[in-house]
Image: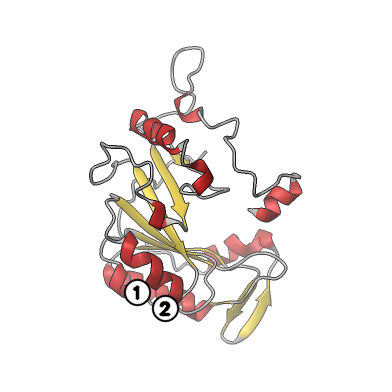
Amino acid sequence: MFRGDERYNRNPNDVHKTSSFKLPIQKDRTGGYKIPSNTTIFTCFTSDFFIEEADEWRKEVYQMMKERSDCHFFMTTKRIDRFPISLPEDWGEGYPNVTIAVTIENQRQADLRLPLYTQLPIQHKCILLEPLLERVDVRKYLDPIEELVVGGESGPEARPCDYAWVLDLRDQAMEKGINFTFKQTGANFIKDGKSYHLDRRFHATQAKKAQIDLFIKRLAYQNEESV
């Protein structure tokens, strides 16, 4: 995120509504929504949905999610402790068209964030272990989880990601019968004790070549166009 903002001369610490903030409910000249039904809308992926500066706007987003119940909204956060703030009164056990994923990078953050996350009223839950910085055991947190997504760190100073850690998480997902996605290797990838320094354009393709993804459960946002 920070590298992307630097490329476009943007200040990553400037939190504001973008020009596409209301795109999910905007309509075309015929009166139909510009974003078609059955689209997965990846929400706030260059920031954090629960960031403090966005508290005053969050109810607007929940209202758009409710209006566009024909689409699926997917978001990630490190601030899962702030989940109750600005939550709509009719949230109940969660909107069925919303996935809120939590990101963790090591065992310490897993043990801090996941005990809270697993108890929250969210219908669709996903854990993103990205960037994966060490071997992590999440077995005791997986009962309400639909998918594990794993990836290494990008950038010139990327910390190593060991393929053995990735395979161990795949085993954990398999034990619980949930989906697993190896999203990317990262720039500093270790396999069988050998280090590989990979250009960013190969991170996802090399992960795909490993052919270790598991598709056990049908996810609400699978096989849908992303915007």
**Location of residue 148 with respect to 30 vertically, above or below:** below
Residue farthest along the bottom direction in this orientation: 193
**Location of residue 21 with respect to 221 vertically, above or below:** above
Q: Which residue is mark 1?
A: 172
Helix, strand or loop at mark 2: helix
Q: Which residue is mark 2?
A: 168
Residue farthest along the left direction in this orientation: 92
In the depicted view, which residue is nearer to us: 121 or 150? 121
Q: Is residue 181 visible?
A: no
Q: Position of residue 10 (x, y in %)?
A: 72, 44
Residue 118: assigned label: none
Mark 1, other Cα within 10 Å: few <14 / some 14–19 / many ≥20: some
Marks 1/2 in contact by CB < 8 Å: the verdict is yes
Helix, strand or loop at mark 1: helix
Amino acid at pointer 2: Asp
Figure disc tally: 2
Q: CA distance from mark 1 to mark 2?
A: 6 Å
Residue 162 found in image quarter: bottom right
Q: Position of residue 133 (x, y in %)?
A: 54, 74
Q: Is residue 157 left or right of residue 152?
A: right
Residue depicted at x 30% and y 67%: 142
Residue 157 found in image quarter: bottom right
In the depicted view, which residue is nearer to us: 125 or 12? 12
Q: How is the image coloured?
A: secondary structure
Residue depicted at x 50% and y 17%: 28
Amino acid at pointer 1: Gln
